Amino acid sequence: MIRFGMALLLAALLAGCGGPQVQVYQAKNTSDEFVDSSTLDGEVFYRERILLAPGTVMKVILADVSKQDVPAQVLASQAFEVQGAPPFPFELSFDHDLIESGRTYAVSVRIEEKGELRFITTSHKSPFNDEYLEIFVEAVAEVTP
């Protein structure tokens, strides 16, 4: 409980300073129906010293990866156009009611330039650990015919 309180205090301080924000859980009210919507905030990095072309698309995905030997259940995904050099900020909205205790969730990222996969996450990144998400993606090797 103390850790959660410290995280909220840190989020308020960082938001006031214009710095990076930690996870923000917000409720949105639409008409007479109450919808519990949440967001994951973070940045995507890669190590290569290259610039991406205009029109490059970064896709951020939140998925339930609890079950083995079956495809992950995608809970939310959003595509962002990026260019230049990282870090690339993102904000991914999802339905908080879909999150169940005892399950395993992961955030993954794909970056496609001119329709070709250029970067992808290669390690598990848990989205619900009360930290600002910093996601590193790795370059995909080019295949020559």
Image (tube, rainbow, N blue to C red):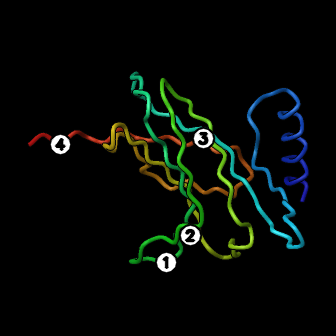
Do the CB atoms of the residues marked 4 and 1 lie less than 8 Å apart?
no
Q: State the separation of the CA atoms marked 4 and 1.
A: 31 Å
Of pointers 3 and 1, the one earlier in the residue sequence: 1
Which of the labelled discs sits on residue 35, or is there none? none
Residue positioned 54% across, 56% down in the render? 61
Instruction: Please name the amino acid that badge 3 sits on.
Output: Glu
Q: Residue at x 88, y 31 (%)?
A: 16
Direction from residue 23 to residue 46 in the image, left or right: left
Task: Look at 85% across and 73% down and name the residue there.
Answer: 33
Residue sitting at 55 percent across and 65 percent down?
63
Instruction: Please name the amino acid that badge 2 sits on.
Output: Asp
Three-letter amino acid code of the residue under disc 4: Val
Q: Which mark is residue 64?
A: 2
Residue neighbourhood size for the residue with mark 3, other residues' Cα within 10 Å, grouped as few (<14), some (14–19), many (≥20): some
Residue 41: x, y in percent?
A: 69, 45
Q: What residue is shown with label 4?
A: 143
Q: Which mark is residue 134?
A: 3
User: What percent of the width, then of the height, locates residue 82?
Assistant: 51, 33
Amino acid type of the residue that numbered disc 1 sits on in the rendered structure: Lys
Judged left or right of residue 92, residue 36 is: right
Label pair 2/1, CB-CB below 8 angstroms: yes
Q: Secondary structure at mark 2?
A: strand
CA gap between label 2 and label 1 equals 8 Å
Q: What kind of element bears circle 3?
A: strand
N-terminal of the pair, mark 4 or mark 2, is: 2
What is the count of numbered marks? Answer: 4
